[in-house]
Image: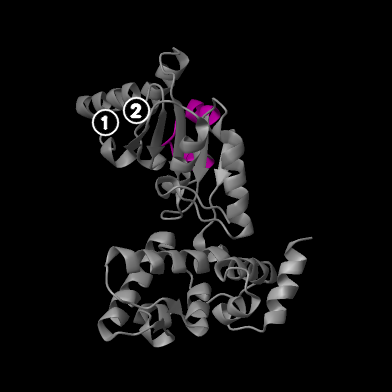
Amino acid sequence: MVHLAAATAVIACSGAMVKAVTLAKRFASLPRPILLVGETGTGKSVLARFIHSQSGRAGSLVVAAGSEVAEPSVEALDGLHKALERARTGTLFLDQLPLWPRAAQTAILRAVEEESQACRFIVASDRSLNELVDEGRLIAAFRWWIGHFVIDVPPLRERFADIAALSYHFLDSARHEFSEPGPAFIDPKALNRLLTYHWPGNVRELRGVVEWSWLRLAAERGERIGVADLPPYVLADGSRGRLNLAGRRDLSVWAFERAGHDRKRAAELLGVHPNTIDNHRRVAAR
């Protein structure tokens, strides 16, 4: 699990996300562009902030979204040049790569080739570079520039321990943000429904679900989110997945940490026997 300052927090408890964060830390100090690939809502912008925080660069993180320059115009390209200038000693995060017009791609490559730009680049895309090139939406030279230091950000449905960790993170955040008594726990059966839901909206959707359930129960003075307290569309989902063994082990490790290394409390969080927590932690430690 990775916990950092609030502005750059990354929660990584599943093996796939831990791998992504490990690569991010390894690439952070390198003066090379980094590509983050993953579905919308998986946390690419959070990972970009984390990489910048670990880079040691003096400047700030400047975000430029493809939606802002999707229609090539003098104003849009002027905005891009201003972003390049603002990020000179920092990091320029180019979000929504599929929406970036070829004219903007050319302008970025020209700035890099002329060595007029000293900033570090992080690019995020929800599509593969090959797909974008084949469709004519990405200049081939841009692919060769950005396609080496790549970090795959897995979808939430494949990150079982992250679903649990993020659910409780959003639960804790709701209690502080809304400043009123509310549920502090998620019933294991309700947590299991969250773990096996397919999460097409990824982390953004999970946050909305947890906050909706929290506010609903807070109004009723409930102390624990149960199955019946989840949104109807989550309960009606017919494409529920199954927890694999690696996911169960990651969950046990997360629960043990969440419970302050109390195996009985960890077991209560997941609705399992304490021996299950011990066995999973033992295997995970090998």
Relative vertical location of residue 194 with respect to residue 206 in this rendering, above or below: below
Q: How is the image coloured?
A: one colour
Per the rendered image, the range of residues in magenta is 130-145
Which residue is pictured at 46% across the width and 78% down the height?
186
Q: Nearer the viewer, residue 170 or 124?
A: 170
Is 113 left or right of 66, judged from the image as shown? right
Q: Secondary structure at mark 2?
A: helix
Is 51 left or right of 261, judged from the image as shown? left
Percent position (x, y) of residue 150?
57, 39
Q: Quadrant of residue 79?
A: top left
Q: Secondary structure at mark 1?
A: loop
Is 5 left or right of 176, judged from the image as shown? right
Percent position (x, y) of residue 231?
35, 79
In the picture of the structure, the residue carrying the numbered disc 2 is 104
Which residue is pictured at 43% across the width and 47% down the height?
46
Residue type for callout 2:
Ala
Which residue is pictured at 45% across the width and 30% down the height?
121
